[in-house]
Structures are given as C-alpha cells and as structure tokens.
C-alpha cells in the first residue's frame, strides 16, 4: 500500500452558512509587502512601522466586517476588568447578616460582584450567605463536602468566579440550570462534564484575560479566540484576537509580544475560514515579513497558509497572477527552510507547488516538483500524487509511462488497497485513462482500449464518466471493424472467454452494440449522436470487409447516419455524418442518393474544409468511374453545377 502523506494542503475549512459569504472587491492592500524583498529590511521594527501595521490590520478587519454585513467596530466579546477607582454602581448593594462587610455584594444573582474577607468558615454557611445577599436560586441538596471550611479574599469578583474558587477548594463544582425566575445553582460532587466543563473553562479564561496586561492575560485572550475558531465561530474568534492585538500591541514584554504576533496570524486564519482570501493573504505576508525565522516555530506553517490563501484567491477570481504569487510564497519558504528535513512543512510545500502547477496545466514543471516530493518521501507517494504524476506523463504524450501509473492505481482500487484519503474520482479517471493511453499509442491499440473501457464500466457503474466511456467504447468498436487484424487481436484476447474464432468475436461485438443501444436513452443528445455515428462507421467498415453482406450492412449504416442527423448534432459531427451517409449509400448501390448528398455538402457554405475536401474526392471518384471526367475535375476542385 502506498504511504499517505501527512497533509496534502493546509486545511482551511469554509464555514457553514445559510448563504454564501460575499467576497471583497479588488483593492490595494497596504499590508502587502514586496515579494522577494530583504527579510531583514521587512523586519525592521520601530514604533511608526508597527503603528502602520496595526492601522492596516484594522482596515483589513473593517473590510471583512463590511463584506459580512457587520457593523465595523462591534464590541469584542471578552471580559474586561473594572476601571481603576471602582466600578459602575449596581442596583443592589448588600452585606451579609453573619459576616457583615466581610461579605458584601453589588448586584443580584449570578451577575453580582462579590467582595469578601473570610477565613476558615464552613462552605455551606458561606454559600447560604451568598445566596441570601445576591438573591440567587439554588438547590439546597445535602452535599457532605460542604461541611468543610473555605477561605475567600476577594475584591469585586463576579459571582460565577466566586463559586469556582470557593467550591474548588473542597473538590466540588457547580452548574447553572433553568432560565429566568427558575434559574438556579446546583452543587455537584466530582468533575464537571460536557457543556458544564466548557462553561467553567471559559469562565477561568475570561477571568485570566481580565487580570491585567501581562503574559497570562495575553495567553488567555488567545486561547479564548482559538476556542471559538476551533468551534467554527470565526467572527467571534476574530473579535477575540482583535482585542488581544488592539489592547496589548504596545506592551514591550517579549512574551506578550509573541502572543500579539500569534493573534495577528490567527486573525488571518479567521479571514481564511470566512473565505476572505485576499485580506487573509495580506495579513499572512505581513506576519512573514515581521517574523524571525530562527525563533518562530509557526513561520513555516504561515508560509503554507499564505500560499493556500493565494491559491484559493486564484481559483475564486481565475487569476493566474495569484497562483504565481502562491508559488512564490512556497519557493520562499523552501529557500529559508528547505534544508531542514525535520520540518513536516517542507515536503508539504513541495507537494503544494506540484499541485499548483498541475492546476495551471504546467505539466512539465508540475512533474518535476512532484518527483522531488516523491524522492523526499523515500520514493513513496499517495495515490493522489501518483495520479497527478501519471496525468502529467499523459499530457506530455508519454503514454506508456502514463498507462503504467494509471494501471497501478486501478489495481490498487480493485484489490481493496485504495488510499482512504484520496477521492474515488481519481480511480475512475485512472481506469478511463488506461483506455485513452491505448488509443493514443502509436500505433493505436483499439482492442486493448476497448477492454480497458469495459473494465472501467464494470468497476464504476455509477461513475461520472459513464457518458465518456460509452462514447469511447463506440469509437473503439468502429475502429476494430476497420481491419481484419483488429478482429484477430480481439479473438486472441477473448480466447479465455471461449471466443476462438472471428465469428465468435464478431458476435461479442454485436452484443456490445446491443448493450450500447440499450443505454442510449439514459444519455443526452450529444452522447447519443456520437455513439450512433460510431456505430454507423463500424457498420460501414464491416461492409467493406465482408463483400457477401455489403449491401445489407451498408443500408444499415445509412440508417445509423440518418439517426445521427436526427439528433441535430454539432456542425463538425453533422458534416462527418453527412459524408458517411453518402459513402454508405454508394456502398449499398444507391448511387443516386450518394451523389445527391455529396452535391448538397459541396453547395453548403457552412461545411468545414476537411469534410468538403473529402466529399469532393468521393464525388470526383464516382464521376471518374462513370467516365464523366469534366465533372470529376470540378468535383475534385470542390465545384458542382
């Protein structure tokens, strides 16, 4: 089984939404740095430059908010500490009857803020006093651990945080149940689970985020945003990260500055998940320019993210420049980190370059990059990469190499050893391309191609390529009927199935025609017309090979060409069918109709030059056989009276 690479591309998952998110219009980006610029120059840090970066980041966030229909400057969803010197006046201020001012509150219920100075008091007693002064509801269920003592020294701390701290001292937890007047506190023995544990962790992080402007606060802000992003809430996550950057970007603590830098990158991740690729790429590239490759473990991955954003931008706008810039990002990443074979991002970058070049149909360059990737992987590659490599060889007309690659993929699928990460479509395409390789070989091997196409039909009965396979099978049938040698090859391949002579092989071909006809009603007109055209060709060629049945077969061919024309095919196929009909009419002995059809073709100005020349040659040959040499000369020139 082939080794599966750890990652094919950076996973930037589009958010689930009821309606598509609008994209941003083209616009100059002040965060965009000059590709290839000296990293040292780009990383020059001074207050003015950083201020410009932050302002440019604000503009990018504003553009994304406007694209999403949001009001720019929406309040960030993050806890903030009270202003120095106090806090806003609450509606209710109470003190405990038992502890006096050592336990007092501003506000009511779980929204209250508690000030306390209590040492070694029973937890149950303290909890009852808290309930009394805040008016919160609770389930007064006996919990033995509440008899243990707790200590609290707090200054205007939110009630949920007070409960966390107090109950945590004695190994208890709590959760909130109900809504409105029925809202109550439930004390729990043991660990919280599910949503309760999540709510408790968020409270702890928000408490840490509001604790000041140091490293703990910075990390808490980042983790809150990362939690939202992981849960596919990119808008909320972007607000969190923006709060981190806006409030702490002036802090000179290197640890804090590192969290701010990661927050900038995370804003780009949010933009990517929202599908705002242009602004995301601008922010990624700014991050790259300001980062130090010797100390930043995230930088290689940011290069990949920037390249993925560029690739998606190119797909969205059909912009080849965006693809080129994405490749530039990957090349720059390999120049800086390519010698470090321990970095998992290095082979991913090579794979991404190969995929980008493949998407752009730059087959030779893609093949080179994919070969380098495979060599770096020890000669092993995923089935997706093997398909790309075989496709490159096919497009470069190396059909023998391509066929070996496609056949190996087909064998892997049929044996049940397919790559679980690869889409089934690559195996369908591989089976189909095995036949195409046989057809394009020199000389073409139509019998082998026919068998390959039939195998593909059996292996993928519901393939998206069924129409293409049907047409390809019909064409192979037409070509096999051209020569006795092809039928002899067919006999050789069918000996294992009991077809030991040409008659048996011909019977198999006739069964094939019946199968094709039985499926024609399932396909649109263009498919039906091409299949009937090839059946007409096959029948006409068989008439040439079997003189005893020539008239009957030629008449049948005329009928197939007529049915083709009834489908009103495209001009090229229409003209070929008209010429084929005229030729089959001559074969059937109906020279009058043959001559009439050829004259109509030569008089029709819409007929292509190739078919016009062929019609002129057929009509000229007919006149020459009849001894009408002046008319033959005119026909050879494409002229008719």
Image (cartoon, helix red, strand yellow):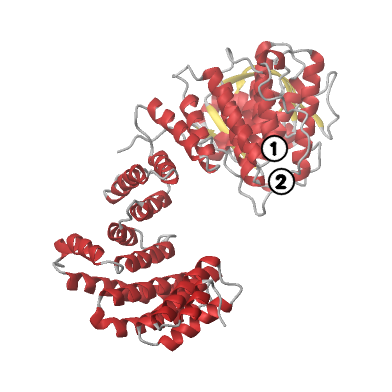
Query: Is disc 1 surrounded by few (<14), some (14 to 19) or many (20+) residues within 10 Å?
Result: many
76 vs 632: above or below: above
Along the line of sight, which residue is nearer the eye, 474 or 353? Answer: 474
Q: Quadrant of residue 494?
A: bottom left
Between the residue at mark 2 and the residue at mark 1, the CA separation in whole angstroms equals 9 Å
- The residue labelled by disc 2 is 23
Residue 577 is left or right of residue 255, and the answer is left
Residue 79 in sight from this viewpoint:
no
Q: Which mark is residue 369?
A: none
Give the x, y percent position of residue 375: 38, 27
Question: Which of these two is toward me, 599 or 464?
Answer: 599
SS type, badge 2: loop
Q: Relative to residue 341, is residue 392 depicted above or below?
A: below
Comparing 475 with 110, the one in front is 475
Query: Residue at the spot x=48%, y=40% of the render?
Result: 363
Is mark 2 in CB contact (under 8 Å) with mark 1? yes
Exactly how many numbered labels are in the figure? 2
Crowd band around label 2 with a 10 angstrom C-alpha radius: few (<14), some (14–19), many (20+): some
Residue 483, quarter of picture: bottom left
Q: Is residue 104 left or right of residue 217?
A: right
Residue at 55% across, 71% down: 571
Q: Which image quarter: residue 621?
A: bottom left
- Label 1, on which residue? 278
Q: Which corner quadrant holds the C terminus?
A: bottom right
Element marked by disc 1: helix
Give the residue at x 77% y 16%: 250
Image position, residue 215 (x, y; %): 66, 16
Q: Is residue 253 above or below residue 63?
A: above
Q: Position of residue 622 (x, y in %)?
A: 42, 80
Quarter containing the N terminus: top left
Query: Percent x, y for residue 17?
Result: 64, 50
């Amino acid at each position: 089984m082939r080794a599966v690479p750890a990652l094919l591309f950076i996973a930037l998952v589009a958010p689930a939404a009821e309606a598509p998110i609008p994209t941003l219009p083209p616009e100059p980006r002040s965060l965009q740095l000059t590709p290839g610029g000296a990293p040292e120059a780009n990383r020059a840090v001074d207050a003015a430059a950083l201020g410009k970066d932050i302002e440019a980041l604000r503009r990018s966030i504003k553009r994304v908010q406007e694209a999403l229909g949001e009001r720019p400057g929406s309040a960030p969803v993050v806890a903030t500490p009270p202003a120095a010197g106090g806090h806003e006046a609450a509606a209710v201020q109470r003190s405990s009857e038992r502890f006096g001012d050592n336990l007092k509150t501003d506000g009511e219920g779980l929204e209250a803020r508690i000030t306390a100075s209590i040492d070694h008091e029973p937890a149950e007693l303290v909890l009852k006093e808290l309930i009394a002064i805040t008016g919160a509801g609770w389930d007064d269920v006996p919990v033995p651990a509440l008899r243990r003592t707790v200590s609290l020294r707090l200054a205007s701390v939110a009630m949920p945080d007070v409960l966390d701290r107090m109950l945590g001292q004695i190994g208890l937890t709590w959760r909130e149940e109900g809504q409105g007047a029925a809202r109550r506190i439930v004390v729990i023995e043991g660990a919280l689970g599910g949503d309760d544990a999540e709510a408790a962790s968020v409270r702890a992080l928000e408490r840490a985020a509001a604790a000041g402007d140091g490293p703990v606060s910075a990390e808490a802000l980042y983790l809150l945003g990362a939690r939202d992003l992981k849960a596919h809430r990119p808008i909320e996550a972007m607000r969190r990260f923006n709060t981190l950057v806006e409030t702490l970007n002036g802090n000179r603590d290197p640890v804090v500055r590192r969290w701010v830098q990661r927050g900038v990158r995370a804003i780009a991740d949010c933009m990517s998940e929202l599908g705002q690729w242009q602004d995301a790429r601008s922010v990624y590239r700014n991050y790259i320019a300001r980062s130090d490759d010797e100390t930043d473990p995230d930088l290689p991955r940011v290069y990949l993210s920037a390249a993925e954003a560029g690739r998606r931008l190119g797909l969205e706008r059909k912009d080849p420049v965006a693809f080129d810039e994405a490749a530039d990002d990957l090349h720059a990443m390999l120049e800086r980190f390519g010698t470090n074979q321990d970095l998992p991002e290095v082979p991913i970058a090579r794979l991404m370059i190969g995929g980008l070049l493949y998407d752009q149909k730059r087959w030779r360059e893609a093949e080179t990059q994919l070969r380098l990737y495979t060599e770096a992987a020890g000669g092993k590659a995923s089935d997706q990469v093997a398909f790309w490599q075989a496709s490159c060889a096919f497009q470069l007309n190396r059909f023998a190499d391509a066929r070996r690659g496609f056949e190996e993929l087909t064998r892997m699928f049929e044996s049940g050893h397919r790559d679980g990460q690869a889409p089934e479509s690559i195996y369908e395409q591989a089976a189909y391309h095995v036949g195409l390789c046989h057809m394009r070989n020199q000389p073409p091997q139509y019998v082998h191609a026919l068998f390959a196409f039939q195998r593909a039909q059996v292996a993928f009965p519901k393939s998206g390529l069924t129409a293409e396979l049907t047409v390809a099978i019909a064409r192979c049938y037409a070509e096999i009927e051209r020569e006795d040698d092809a039928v002899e090859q067919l006999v050789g391949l069918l000996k294992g199935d009991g077809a030991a002579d040409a008659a048996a092989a011909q019977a198999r071909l006739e069964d094939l025609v019946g199968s094709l006809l039985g499926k024609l009603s399932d396909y649109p007109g263009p498919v039906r017309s091409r299949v009937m055209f090839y059946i007409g060709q096959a029948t006409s060629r068989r008439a040439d090979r079997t003189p005893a049945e020539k008239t009957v077969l030629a008449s049948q061919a005329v009928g197939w060409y007529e049915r083709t024309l009834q489908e009103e095919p495209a001009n090229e196929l229409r003209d070929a069918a008209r010429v084929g009909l005229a030729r089959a009419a001559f074969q059937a002995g109906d020279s009058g109709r043959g001559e009439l059809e050829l004259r109509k073709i030569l008089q029709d100005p819409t007929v292509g030059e190739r078919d016009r020349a062929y019609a002129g040659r057929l009509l000229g040959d007919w006149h020459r056989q009849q001894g009408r040499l002046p008319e033959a000369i005119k026909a050879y020139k494409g002229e008719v009276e």
